Image (cartoon, rainbow, N blue to C red):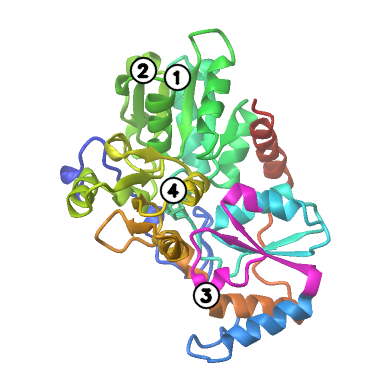
Amino acid sequence: MTTAQTTELDVQPTPLALLLLGREADPRSERGVECPGDLPSPSDPDLVERARAAKEKLGDKVFVLGHHYQRDEVIQFADVTGDSFKLARDAAARPEAEYIVFCGVHFMAESADILTSDDQKVVLPDLAAGCSMADMATAEQVAECWDVLTEAGIAEQVVPVSYMNSSADIKAFTGKHGGTICTSSNAQRALEWAFEQGEPHSTKVLFLPDQHLGRNTAVRDLGMSLEDCVLYNPHKPNGGLTAEQLRAAKMILWRGHCSVHGRFSLESVRDVRERIPGVNVLVHPECKNEVVAAADYVGSTEYIIKALEAAPAGSKWAIGTELNLVRRLANRFAPEGKEIVFLDKTVCFCSTMNRIDLPHLVWTLESLAEGNLVNRIEVDKETEAFAKLALERMLALP
Ligand code: SF4
């Protein structure tokens, strides 16, 4: 898409988000390097057996975490499944596990490293498994944004709130500047907390990096208007905003988005309602505001799973979240007579999540079983300390 074609609410991916995956290290991106080992062939018929044998050999020394959006071939080896924050806490609750194999993406492995003990080593089976949303806010861009807020004379009124789906650097920035982390389950509480800091009525929130979660929470849950929110574009001078616009705003939204959830449109909602009369539309809050406004229910991944568990037999559901999860839920609940379809007509996997496949998992587990620590994700101590501060503020939220 060219700049001329871009509307105000559309998002230009950063150049970082378009990097070819798996080639060399890129210090400006959280995406990594190509696999340093010899991967088994995807057509090896013994992959499942090899993964099982290596995992058995490692025993309690290894704990495999599987994010909800992972492929079935990987999920079958997960000791626990969940969203990124739950998984990081699960890892911290298993101190006997020396190796935490995180089947997810880079920022999740960083969070697990921050929350686990120094003796535990977090491993990401493919270092190129990044998150395009997390890549949309780099430490340099966010530091520049803070300078812009300082110039506008409002930095002292601003509390940063960063979504879990951000790099350790951004979490550390948040901790350093008195802010908190949030998940899609507690974003409302995090924003309420943030607005209670400082002088009444003067506090502003800088919400990073997902504009949609920030906007949806502010408008749906806190009753703000769309005009209370401004969009900070890190690719434009001063974020594309005047000092007056920044001073007038309550929510300063970073111009980032999830490439998976950002694909759902109002058209998808209208279309599914036509195709399936009586369907319940349930979407993740990372979707655009007009999609969320048109849906029947909105909630985090865990909310979606619980809603479907509680749904009556015979009910019909169109789900706006990652396809691996939707397919798994559709299969799980089909015997109970619940009809579950994907909200969009086009296939919508998270391509970076999908980089973790069986060959990478086998290579990782076999390497660890042979005593070779591979693909370790380690956050430096200073970053870890400030990021932990922001995470602890989240844990202390009422
Ligand atoms: S689904 Fe979206 S937010 Fe989640 S890892 Fe993929 S790109 Fe990132």
Crowding at dot 3, Cα within 10 Å, few <14 / some 14-19 / many 20+, comes out as some
Q: Which mark is residue 73?
A: 3
Specify the amino acid type for callout 3. Answer: Glu
Cα–Cα span, label 2 and label 4: 48 Å
Residue wearing tag 4: 311
Question: Which one is in front in this view, the residue at disc 2 or the one at disc 4?
Answer: 4
Amino acid at dot 2: Ala
Query: How dense is the environment of label 1, judged by Cα within 10 Å: few (below 14), some, or many (20 and up)?
Result: few
- Is residue 64 magenta-colored? yes
Q: Earlier in the sequence, mark 2 or mark 1?
A: 1
Range of magenta residues: 59-87
Residue 385, placed above or below residue 193: below
Does the magenta segment cover residue 138? no
* Residue identified by numbered label 2: 243
The answer to which quarter of the image holds residue 151 is: top left
In the shown orientation, is residue 121 left or right of residue 274?
Answer: right
- Residue identifier under label 1: 151
Residue at horizontal 46 percent and vertical 67 percent from the top: 354
The CB of the residue at mark 3 lies under 8 Å from ligand 1: no
Establish whether ligand 1 lies closer than 8 Å to the Cβ of label 2.
no
Which quadrant is the C terminus positioned in? top right
SS state under label 1: helix
- Which of pointers 4 and 1 lies earlier in the amino acid sequence? 1
Q: Nearer the viewer, mark 2 or mark 3?
A: 3
